[in-house]
Image (spheres, rainbow, N blue to C red):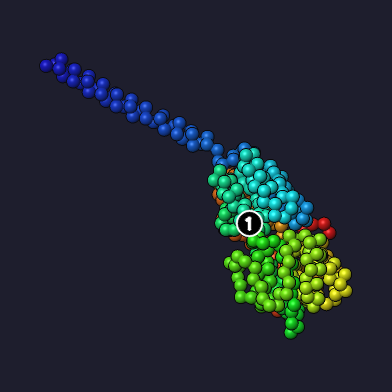
Amino acid sequence: MLFAKKFTLLLTLLIVGLLVAACGGAQPASAPAEESAAEAPAPAGDEEIIVGLITKTETNPFFVKMKEGAQAKADEYGATLLTAAGSFDGDNAAQVTAIENMVNAGAKGILITPSDTKAIVPAIQKARDAGVLVIALDTPTDPQDATDALFATDNFKAGLFIGEYTKAAMGDTPMKIATLDLAPGISVGILRHNGFMAGAGLADVDDTATDLVNSPEVVCSQDTQGDQAKGQTAMENCLTKDPDINVVYTINEPAAFGAHTAIKNAGKENDVLIVSVDGGCVGTQGVADGQIAATSQQYPLKMATQGVEAIVNFAKTGEAPSGYTDTGVTLITDKPVDGVDSEDTVFGLENCWGDK
């Protein structure tokens, strides 16, 4: 009986000991989990952060300034900037290749000014599927939510401002308008054109329209691809079609300078009001010199620096930007009109981009 009691006591002690050991062994088992969480670096951590920038071309001063701003901000953060561009405005194939190359190079994010706003979407989706943040600069994709975010001028508003200016400047004078546009299907061209038409009071249209809207006052429309030489040829064609054109809307200032050359060669430089969009230093000087009546100034440096900041933050924290960020637009003219807010070319030249 005594032996049985001792045996029971020993058995009980043994079981308790085993249970304590088991519980005690469970405690260190959680340590590796905590250690693993601590060792898992925040996104990017001390790794090299690679940022991609793809512009429409390398020659347009707008994109030159954008590249300068992106490089300066990347240097500030110690990030590596990869850049690429199309050989011409509308070179979608080059932009697709650039996206693929940047994804393969390990870019955390890509900033892009899409040349073909629809055709580029599948390449962007592949990059996003691979975990790359994609932000559109200046020009929204079609659809806009094909990218994670958009940092851009409100291009409809930019057109609206010069349209409102045109309406006030022309007063009761009937308008005969030539529009020198960008190219078919490009969202930035549609937004600026339709904004102009709305601001001039010639069309009931908003920023959701996907096609160019015109009215009987528009007697000629030509595509220029934003090029000065093509702008001159387009304006010559329009003047041949209707010599009494007295208003010219242009997609950008290079096209405006081309239009001015054609108008001057026709001896009509004092008879035609030219309005435009961009606000580069050369274009703003064109306003000061009287070649362009007014331009809507946008700010590519701000787009690029905010874009790089967003990608670096995403690489470090995993926080991705979303939606649309308006980087601002200002009407520049030395011939202000009542009821339309504007700044003069002194302001414009202080805040412009490109060579002065």
Q: Residue at x 25, y 24 (%)?
A: 15
Q: Residue at x 61, y 72 (%)?
A: 205
Residue 293, quarter of picture: bottom right
The percent coordinates of residue 173 (x first, y second) are 75, 83
* In the foreground, 56 or 230: 230
Residue at 61% x, 56% y: name it.
118
Report helix, strand or loop for mark 1.
loop
Report the residue marked by disc 1.
Answer: 117
Taking 140 as reference, is 83 above or below it? above
Q: Residue furthest bottom?
A: 172
- Tell me if 90 is positioned left or right of 24 in this view: right
Q: How many marks?
A: 1
Relative to residue 274, is residue 320 drawn left or right? left
Residue at the extreme top = 3
Where, quadrant-wise, is the C terminus in this rendering? bottom right
Report x, y in % for residue 11.
22, 20
Q: Quadrant of residue 272?
A: bottom right
Mark 1: few, some, or many residues within 10 Å (few <14, many ≥20)?
A: many
| Quadrant position of residue 330 | bottom right
What percent of the width, then of the height, locates residue 147? 58, 53
In the image, 295 versus 242, the foreground residue is 242
Q: Is residue 345 visible?
A: no
Q: Position of residue 277 (x, y in %)?
A: 73, 65
In the displayed orientation, state which residue is furthest to the left. Answer: 1
The type of residue carrying mark 1 is Thr
